[in-house]
Amino acid sequence: MKAYFNQLPGLLDKGLAPFYLVSGEEPLQQMEAADKIRAKAAAQGYGHREFFFIEPDFDWSRLAAAAGNLSLFAERRFMDIRLPGDKLPARGAEFFREVLESPPEQVLFLVQARKVDGRAAWVRRATEHGVWVQVYAKNPVELRAWLRERMARAGVAAGEGVAELIAERAEGNLLAAAQEVEKLKLLCGDDTLEADEAGRIVGDSAHYSVYDLADAAVGGDGRRAVQVLEGLRGEGAPEPLVLWALADQVRRLLLMERRLAAGDSRESVLRAVWKAKQPVYRKALARGLRHRWWGVLYACHEADRAVKGHGADDAWHELLRLVLRASGAGALRRAPAA
């Protein structure tokens, strides 16, 4: 079936489906939807999680073998799959068709993608045999309502105009808006927050932001990117948030490069992003070819493993390696194995 983000908790309370597809251009809701599914799966005994990032040359036989392997201890398994693009190769579509028509026992699938074609046969089957959760960017009216609800849940007593102020500063970015709500919660406690005070707090954002980092990295300013990364580390920025900002920027660049390769003009491609961000993407697109950004996206996968504690190196070292690769500033050697 098809479902929206706000319908997901109720569906999960009724029981788990064997297959979940989460897609959309809004990263915060996509991350939170995936987290809700993972939490429910863990509570239902799906303790063995396997992660797969699908790159252009991905060997689908690996995924088929992993899904078909029977656990000696009958352990329930969770297959966490990320699709970077909006189209699947024939082998990938065939794999999903097979698992949807005949789901492997004790296996739950979560597939995440920025965009999928609802006319594709495998997506139609996902709605028939599983759940397709679609997340959308919010318009200004929806964003203000979302902020009021989020502040209420966080215990932030906000006066008139606070939601409007945050919505204006966030420019439609739910993740940035959510960060501001968390900051207000920490700084204001139980006090009622008025718009003038909120303006001072929201305006006094941290000296460094994850968006400053991503802009400097993809723009080729390695010195600035490393400086911001160290600042974020010193301020205690969450590693997953740092990685998300970098990966999100790279995925957007890959989609832009794809449109350029298909014949779209650079100006039409840039019009699809916020006006304030167009200089960043213009500079990044002028730097190199698609293979550069695919390599950086793979480095994001390595950093993701480190952030989750499965990498060969420290998470911040892996993030530094990713920043250097994205900015073209050079390579950082991994520490030798002990």
Image (cartoon, grey):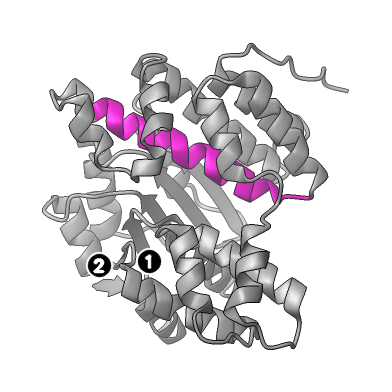
- Is residue 121 found left or right of 144 in the rendered image? left
> Is disc 2 placed on a helix, strand or loop?
helix
Q: Amino acid at mark 2?
A: His
Q: Looking at the image, which residue is at 56% across and 27% down?
A: 217
Pointer 2 residue: 129
Q: Are marks 2 and 1 in contact (CB under 8 Å)?
A: yes
> Is disc 1 placed on a helix, strand or loop?
loop
Which class describes the residues within 10 Å of circle 2: few (<14), some (14-19), or many (20+)?
A: some
Instruction: Please determine whether, in this image, residue 86 is positioned above or below residue 60.
Output: below
How far is the residue under mark 2 from the one under mark 1? 8 Å
Q: Which residues are magenta?
A: 236-258
Q: Looking at the image, which residue is at 29% across and 25% down?
A: 257
Q: Amino acid at mark 1?
A: Pro
Q: Check the image and name the residue furthest to the front.
A: 196
- Is residue 59 found left or right of 121 in the rendered image? right
Can residue 295 be spotted in the picture? Answer: yes
- Is residue 290 found left or right of 162 in the rendered image? left
Residue 18: image tag:
1
Q: Is residue 245 magenta?
A: yes
Can residue 16 be spotted in the picture? Answer: no
Q: Point out residue 263 in the picture as x, y percentages from the top left corner.
A: 13, 23
Q: Point out residue 60 in the picture as x, y percentages from the top left corner.
A: 36, 34
